[in-house]
Amino acid sequence: MRDRRIGARMGAITGAGVLALTMAAPAAAQTEVEVIGYASPGLAADYGWNEQGLGATEAAAEGVGATVLVADDLGYDVTQPSLRSLAEDGADMIVAMASGYNVDGPVVAEETGVPTLIVDAPDSMVPGLVGNVSFDPNPGGYLAGALAGTMTESDVLGVVISASEDPNWWQAAAGFVEGARSVNPDVEFATASISEFGYDDIEGGNRVTSQVIAAGADIVFGQGDFAAQGMFAAVEAADGVMFIDVIGDKSAIDEQGVLLSSVLWDFTDAFVQAAADVEAGTFGTEGYWLDLANGGISLLETDLWSDDGRAAVEVALAGVTDGSIELPPVTDQAAYDALVGG
């Protein structure tokens, strides 16, 4: 299957690609990075969050001539011991790949002196010790919505969320709603979530996706880590339904041709820059940012796209990147429900 990314050309994360959070403290001493430790809550084979993080870490290691120590499938109960073990095993830098590690990561960095990259907690940055990468899921959701709103035949779109306590999912879902409405004011939404923290609940993903399909959805926007495998399977089992994924690219397992697109999150440039900053002694003085403009967020194009769908995505991309389209600051289910019901 042919695919490409709809978004800005990938490049080094500089200028607009770096979150402007300059700290007052002096830069840290330069550190040679020979080993990078990678810690993730799920298996790094999910075609999603955990795998994307590992791939970006491997690229960062290649950029500085380092090797990678992998500690995946950790969950959230043994974070500090796991991060300490990476430090004790020789990691000169650690990637703590979960927002749920944003408390433990800085604690272990302070204890061990090993620079640690955390996710979506810019206020926790410490020069020389703690760096942060953040992202804006809303615009990517908007592009996906414009595609889905154009291509739906039932005028019902499914939105499936694995973890109802994750604000990023609601941000992307809100963008999806706005994007779909921009091209199809008659579209309706069937929304379901698995649980508060159902990131890896494959059975739950299958169950709630089947529910939105039963409600008439012919395109499902699914957001989860391993839970997305269950969402994908439910779409495959249905007739005439397509799937829009997030973060990773499931084309390799799309045997039935149901993957319409994915809102891709690519951490590669951010992690490469972070490793370079550790070596330069500037780590933790500026954060890293993924968005459409720097290519950290993009939309996967597949052969299932119609010409009208492609045109709608291009219009949406132009409007979001030039600022003429403003997206709502939705970060929880209550605000999302108000948006959908409004």
Image (tube, grey):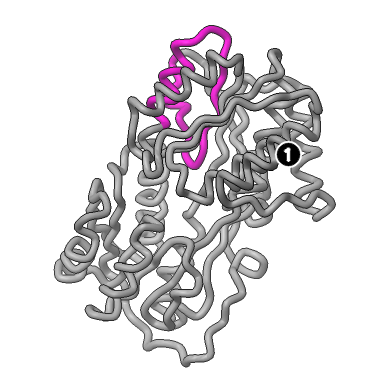
Quarter of the image where one finds residue 204: top left
Q: Quick check: 159 above or below 55?
A: above
Residue sitting nearer the eye, 319 or 6: 319
Give the residue type that dot 1 points to.
Glu
Quarter of the image where one finds residue 58: bottom left
- Left or right: 318 in relation to 198: right
- Left or right: 273 in relation to 95: right
Place of residue 200 in the rendered image (x, y in percent of width and height, measured from the top left) = 33, 37
Instruction: Decide: few, some or many residues near mark 1? Use Cα within 10 Å; few <14, some 14-19, many ≥20.
Output: many
Question: Range of the magenta residues?
Answer: 228-255
The residue lying furthest to the top in this view is 239
Residue sitting nearer the eye, 289 or 103: 103
Residue sitting nearer the eye, 264 or 202: 202
The residue at 45%/48% (across/down) is 165
Q: How many numbered markers are drawn?
A: 1
Residue behind mark 1: 178
Place of residue 87 in the rendered image (x, y in percent of width and height, measured from the top left) = 20, 70
Q: Quick check: 50 above or below 83?
A: above
Place of residue 193 in the rendered image (x, y in percent of width and height, measured from the top left) = 47, 34
- Left or right: 130 in relation to 20: left
The residue lying furthest to the right in this view is 324
The residue at 40%/69% (across/down) is 275
Q: Quick check: 313 above or below 188?
A: below
The residue at 19%/68% (across/down) is 84
